Image (cartoon, rainbow, N blue to C red):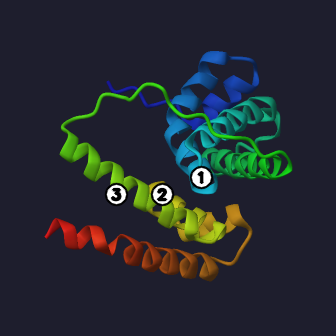
């Protein structure tokens, strides 16, 4: 006999009743998605991680407002987008200087690490150059697997606008990453 996995709605109900372990399971399920979405809004990974943490804190605080008749994931992603935008707004109010890392993380061979690092930097720059709505749309669609309709609801725009944003974002990313394709040949 196979046990059915616990649904997000069940975990949210248990967490809302004070079950920290249930909330921990929700965090485990959604942490990668929340981090990718906050990184789509914020350029600095550390700032994006702060926004992700703020999103989970807000989620915990407002679980009583969650409507169990609707999917949990989009509700949480909306909180994450808002948290990232709040972090960006606060940064504009008081700019800070980034700290330089003192310790390098171990990487596989220098060639592979350099290539990956260069590609990652190029992708991050290309994503950062996109308008925010296009950046969010392409990350939510391609990396997170949300449908155009779900993204439209999260961003408060028409579904056709999301389709257009994903198309234009992909085209801009392809153009920005084209030199890496030539290098691989």
Circles 3, 1 touching at the beta carbon (< 8 Å) = no
Q: Residue 171, position in %: x, y?
A: 43, 80
* Element at label 2: helix
Label 2 – label 3 distance at C-alpha? 9 Å
Q: Quadrant of the N terminus?
A: top left
From the image, tell me which residue sits under label 3. 119
* Marks 2 and 1 in Cβ contact (< 8 Å): yes
The numbered mark, 2 or 1, whose residue comes first in the sequence reads: 1
Residue 96, percent across and down?
74, 41
Give residue 21's position: percent from left, percent from top: 60, 17
The residue indicated by pointer 2 is: 124
Specify which label sits upstream in the sequence, 3 or 1: 1
| Tag 1 residue | 43
- Give the number of marks: 3
Q: Nearer the viewer, residue 46 or 152?
A: 46
Residue extending furthest toward the left: 185
Relative to residue 9, is residue 140 depicted above or below? below
* Quadrant location, the C terminus: bottom left
Mark 1 residue element: loop
The secondary element bearing badge 3 is classed as: helix
Q: Residue at x 53, y 59 (%)?
A: 140
Q: Residue furthest right?
A: 93
Give the numbered dot on residue 184. none
Do the residues under discs 2 and 3 have CB atoms within 8 angstroms? no
Question: Is 48 on the left or on the right of 120, as rendered?
Answer: right
Q: How many C-alpha atoms fall within 10 Å of the one at disc 1: few (<14), some, or many (≥20)? A: some
For marks 2 and 3 on the same chain, the one whose residue lies earlier in the sequence: 3
Q: Is residue 169 above or below residue 21?
A: below
The image quadrant of residue 110 is top left
Q: Decide which of 161, 180 is in the foreground and name it.
A: 180
Q: Residue at x 75, y 45 (%)?
A: 87
Examine the rendered structure and indicate whether residue 157 appears above or below residue 154: below
């Amino acid at each position: 006999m196979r046990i059915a996995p616990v649904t997000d709605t069940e975990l949210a109900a248990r967490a809302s009743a004070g079950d920290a372990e249930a909330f921990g399971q929700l965090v485990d399920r959604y942490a990668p998605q929340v981090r990718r979405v906050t990184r789509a809004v914020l350029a600095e990974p550390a700032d994006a991680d702060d926004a992700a943490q703020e999103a989970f804190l807000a989620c915990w605080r407002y679980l009583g407002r969650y409507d169990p008749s609707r999917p949990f994931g989009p509700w949480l992603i909306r909180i994450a987008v808002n948290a990232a935008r709040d972090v960006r707004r606060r940064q504009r109010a008081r700019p800070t200087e980034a700290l330089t890392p003192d310790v390098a993380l171990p990487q596989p061979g220098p060639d592979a690490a350099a290539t990956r690092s260069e590609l990652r930097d190029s992708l991050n720059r290309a994503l950062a150059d996109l308008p925010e709505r296009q950046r969010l749309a392409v990350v939510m669609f391609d990396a997170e697997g949300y449908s155009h309709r779900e993204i439209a609801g999260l961003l408060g725009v028409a579904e056709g606008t999301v389709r257009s944003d994903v198309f234009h974002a992909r085209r801009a990313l392809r153009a920005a990453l084209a030199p890496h394709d030539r290098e691989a040949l």
